[in-house]
Image (cartoon, helix red, strand yellow):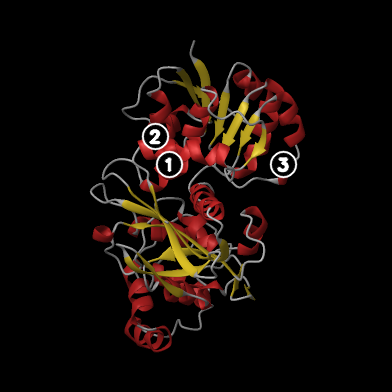
Amino acid sequence: MKKKVCVLGSGLVSRPAIEYLSKKKNIDLTVASLNISDIDSVTDGISNFKKLALNVKNRVELKELLTDQEVVISLLPASMHPLVARAALKTNTHFACTSYLSDRIKEINSKAEAAGLIFINECGMDPGLDHMSAMSLINKLKQKNYTIRSFESYGSGIPAPQDNNNPLGYKFSWTPKGVLLATRNEAIFQRDDQILHFFAGTIFNCTWDVNVPELGILEAYPNRNSLKYTELYGLNGISTLVRGTLRNPGWGKIMRMFYHLGLLNEIEFKNTPDTYRALFNHLTEKYLSTFSKRELIVHLQGIYGKQPVAALKWLGLLDDAPLNVDMKNSIDIIALVMAKKMAYLASEKDMIIIYHVVKAENAKGEMKEFTSKLVSYGTPGGNFAMASTVSLPVAIAAELIINKKITKPGVHIPTIPELYEPILNGLEKNGVVVEEAL
């Protein structure tokens, strides 16, 4: 008998999950979204599934859908996951999502356990594959009686080297606004027993080089709060604990300039500026508005260097060309401008990287270095690597649940072998491979 699985959401990352599950003969798949047209836009060429228009905030409709579903996968905005999770609890449906575990979902752990339900969170790329690959390496070293002294973990989604062809060294495989807002996060991490805290807007004052095997030198900057992973990964007593984001060299200088100039501020316009230069002048509080374009380039190069200013020029933000945008929020406008210039062509592919570097001490007191690396490429004209590595893990998890290969009830993230081992095995069968140097 077929088991029923439903996917909620039809964003960019949903296609690989839908594609994967639609091919399983023992799964009866339903895809639900607010608009049928959104489903159609991400499922072209995919068959063997049902589609349904659904307003998730309509609790009656949501409960009606979930009543006979074995597993629900939520690929909705993170704020909606608790609503889906609580409905799944009432309908005796297993739940899986790719977003960070929220307190509201943590609260239902005991009820999920009592009902024998599995609620997997953080089962995407980051968070998700970062946990799985990290814990696989960490636990193998502990089994060999190594004491871990240093743990550095890096994640990235950037153009494949052959398609890295703009001054920013970056293209968008997920929401541009999300990328820009993330530049304003604060960060805290530990290096050589010293706690380093960088407040909002200052993280690009702290960048360093990371040499990724076969890819070369990339630029790293700290990613949010690394210290919470001390307990999560069982790394108490460690001297260095860093989680960072990788970009192509120069990204930090570009973002630092954007921040200094005010281009990443959120300003509400009564009237959207008519030209790119008018937008630039407004966001920089007009103190550069008297400069000609040539004078402005010389002035900014003297402060920030050539690469950041080349990026600014390439985006057209110094031009008098018509903006032709009807938006009121400045960061939405900047995101749209960047998205237009920094989109992948059909012939291009993205690349995701997860790279861990562990220094550990053996019983003889010898310090050794170990690494774990996952590099995956998108398919030109097909799925982004970012989309695949976000939604394939959660789709595989759903399949494992219905096949009773994952059976541990309760609210989880994939940091335990019962979860990460079968998911990583499933990913390897689909060409997403973690390489460990032990």
The residue identified by callout 1 is 12
The residue identified by callout 3 is 106
Q: Is residue 110 left or right of residue 280?
A: right
The residue identified by callout 2 is 42
Residue 260: x percent and y percent?
52, 78
| Amino acid at pointer 1 | Leu
Front in this rendered view, residue 51 or 3: 3
Hey, which residue is sitting farthest front in the picture? 364
In this view, the mark in front (2 or 3):
3
Residue 153: x percent and y percent?
50, 61
Q: Quadrant of residue 199?
A: bottom right
What's the residue at 64%, 43% (across, down)? 79
Front in this rendered view, residue 57 or 307: 307
| Amino acid at pointer 3 | Lys
Vertical position of residue 298 compared to residue 31: above or below: below
Q: Quadrant of residue 149?
A: bottom right
Q: Earlier in the sequence, mark 2 or mark 1?
A: 1
